[in-house]
Image (spheres, helix red, strand yellow):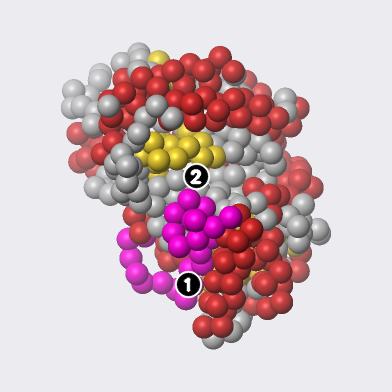
Amino acid sequence: MTNPIPLHNRHQAVLPDWLALYYDRPIELTHGEGRHVWDADGNRYLDFFGGILTTMTAHALPEVTKAVSEQAGRIIHSSTLYLNRPMIELAERVAALSGIPDARVFFTTSGTEANDTALLLATTYRRSNQILAMRNSYHGRSFSTVSITGNRGWSPTSLSPLQTYYVHGAVRGRGPFAHLSDADFTAAAVEDLQDILGQARGGIAALIAEPIQGVGGFTSPPDGLYGAFREVLDRHGILWISDEVQTGWGRTGEHFWGWQAHAQNGPPDILTFAKGIGNGMSIGGVVARAEVMNCLDSHSISTFGGSPVTMAAGVANLAYLLEHDLQGNARRVGGLLLERLRAIAAQVPAVREVRGRGLMAGLELTRPGTDEADPQAAAAVLEAARAGGLLLGKGGGHNTSVLRIAPPLSLAVAEAEEGAVILEQALRVLN
């Protein structure tokens, strides 16, 4: 018998007030197929957010659902205390793709836990609790990852197990360096980094950075900036952690990993990933060279990291992504979509900037003629797009005024155009 109390009321009665929900009338998604999802009322939506960049290939992808079903029929759980064939197979493939020499892989259940593990490795290896992070950053919701998050909207406490120094450079279009050329911007950010190192008490463990900031509103530095940082970091023995939770697996189109746009001085020491690799299954992980990964001198396990079922999903999903060149599709379809979005934005004074790469696009909304963020406008467009049959995300370090677009990487050209038309109509609420 159906519970007569509305689901939203039940949600509010038992779940935290700070657990965010989209829309004035939150929706329950019941099923999906391809790039579309349906709600409990039978409404169909084109999904341009993919469960926060997590449904990476497609909803109900047959290859993934088959792999999950078959593995669940054999054994669902064993823990890392036993040999686990699907985990080893996925680790072999991720290690080979990572670009990190002599790589070791540790699986977790989320991006938060992956970044938490990376911080544990870096601080242990360097015997220091000092971390460099980027302004406007987001790295997860655990105590340690909140403590290095540079986006105040997602950092509920100033208490911290780490001493964090925040570096300029991740936001190209705002801040004191925005007026500079790319080369001068990079030089100024490197100078800022060097200044911070002069103020720190030495022995900084690592720099952690998202190649494209996700929650921060899909902001990014000029290509090569983190490679330029790497020259400075190497002189001091400081590790580079590339947070690829949102940028990995070819989403940016041009590269398989976001760090590859900054590769002039080699790969990162540590790479973290999550979200898309499981296509909705709970997978996160850390890749590091063996010297760093093996620096822990105590025993450890993971009860749920590397679960046979999630690993089977990851193996099938990664195989599909590579065999169907979804990175190439992200480059081609994403490029067309970004061109279309920029043409639309040129007619809407409230759109300050369209930015992004591949199938990772952001529209920043401000009060026309100013740089003042307009979160009410973003909320209004989100609602209007939903009414038109399109699901978007929100983000941004300036009062959540960026519309985030990140559909499954199998998006077709016709679907990209369909989404652009709906978004163009939704933006009319601002005129």
Say whether marks 2 and 1 touch (CB < 8 Å). Answer: no
**The disc labelled 2 sits on which kind of residue?**
Phe
Q: How far apart are the two marked residues, 2 and 1, measured between alpha carbons?
A: 22 Å
Identify the residue position indicated by label 1 in the image.
164
Residue 239 percent across, percent down from the top left: 66, 69
| 11 vs 148, nearest the viewer | 148
Q: Quadrant of the C terminus?
A: top left
Marked residue nearer the N-terminal end (2 or 1): 1
Residue 140: in sight, yes or no? Answer: no
Residue 219 image point, x, y percent: 50, 48
Indicate whether residue 418 is drawn in magenta. no
Q: What secondary structure is found at the residue carrying circle 2?
A: loop
Around disc 1, counting alpha carbons within 10 Å, would you say few (fewer than 14), some (14 to 19), or many (20 or more)? many
Front position in the image: 40 or 53: 53
Identified at 34% across, 54% down, the residue is 153
Q: Which residues are magenta?
A: 155-181
Number of the label disc, if any, that sits on residue 218: 2
Q: Of discs 2 and 1, which sits in the foreground?
A: 2
Q: Is residue 166 magenta?
A: yes
Quadrant where the image shows the N terminus: top left
Secondary element at image label 1: strand
Residue 367 in percent (x, y) is at 29, 41
Indicate whether 421 appears above or below 10: above
Q: Residue at x 24, y 28 (%)?
A: 25
